[in-house]
Image (tube, rainbow, N blue to C red):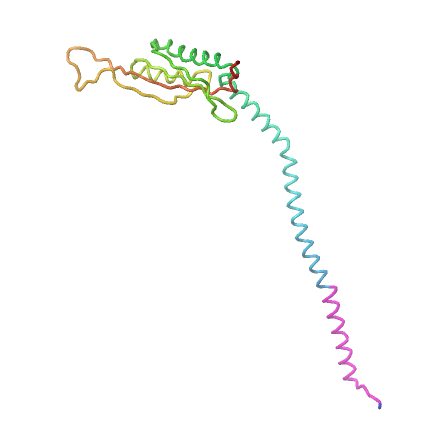
């Protein structure tokens, strides 16, 4: 039996073959290539961002070293304001000297002083406290606290208590009234290193 292919059928077969070829080309060549290109563009964008970060880090490299150097200088200067703690006796003497000189400037007479032993503040510093008491006017107290604030070493006020020496309910008529207070202060100094362990 003999098949005759008409012109119309031949065109349909050619169109079918072309359509099948197009399908395979698009499915196995064009679309995968497009996906790879899209993935490559995403990778390129990520690499570009990474390159920008590296360039920034490279440009700032010198800046970071300057900042580190400045931080080291600031640290050394700040440590210079701490009382040296390698010898607890000398640290106590230094704190007492600073307080006594501030009191002497203002002609204050300090009462008994109570020094504590150096106690651990954290992993890097210890703290030494000193309790003092004296009598003065409110103005002298403010000036004394200012002298402590301006001292060459870093000293803080841990506690302050003031009580009037004389309670007055009305202004005296026949005498000058001098306001005076009794002051109890606890001062603290940070030591730059751990105190030496006592021998024996």
Residue name at image x 35 percent, y 18 percent = 185
Residue name at image x 44 percent, y 17 percent = 117
* Figure quadrant of the N terminus: bottom right
Residue name at image x 67 percent, y 53 percent = 41
Residue name at image x 72 percent, y 67 percent = 27
**Residue 113, image x, y percentages:** 37, 13
**Residue 84, image x, y percentages:** 51, 16
Tell me: 151 left or right of 111: right
Among all residues in the image, which is located at the extreme right?
2
Dominant secondary-structure state across the stretch colored magenta: helix
Residue 10 lies in the magenta-colored region: yes
Camera-nearest residue between 25 and 166: 166
Tell me: 39 left or right of 123: right
Camera-nearest residue between 75 and 111: 111
What is the span of residues highlighted in magenta in the rendered image? 2-29
Tell me: 150 left or right of 161: right
**Residue 190, image x, y percentages:** 47, 21
């Amino acid at each position: 039996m003999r098949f005759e292919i008409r012109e119309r059928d031949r065109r349909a077969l050619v169109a079918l073959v072309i359509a099948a070829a197009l399908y395979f080309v698009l499915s196995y060549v064009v679309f995968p290539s497009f996906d790879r290109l899209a993935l490559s563009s995403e990778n390129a964008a990520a690499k570009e961002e990474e390159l920008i970060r590296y360039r920034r880090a490279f440009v700032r490299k010198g800046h970071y070293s300057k900042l580190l150097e400045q931080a080291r200088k600031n640290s050394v200067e700040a440590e210079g304001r701490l009382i040296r703690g390698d010898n607890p006796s000398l640290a106590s003497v230094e704190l007492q000297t600073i307080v006594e000189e501030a009191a002497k400037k203002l002609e204050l007479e300090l009462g008994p002083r109570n020094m504590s032993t150096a106690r651990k503040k954290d992993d890097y510093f210890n703290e030494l406290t000193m309790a003092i008491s004296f009598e003065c006017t409110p103005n002298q107290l403010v000036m004394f606290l200012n002298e402590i604030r301006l001292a060459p070493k870093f000293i803080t006020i841990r506690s302050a208590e003031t009580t009037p020496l004389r309670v007055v309910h009305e202004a005296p008529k026949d005498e000058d009234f001098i306001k005076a207070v009794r002051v109890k202060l606890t001062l603290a100094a940070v030591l730059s290193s751990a105190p030496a362990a006592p021998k024996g």
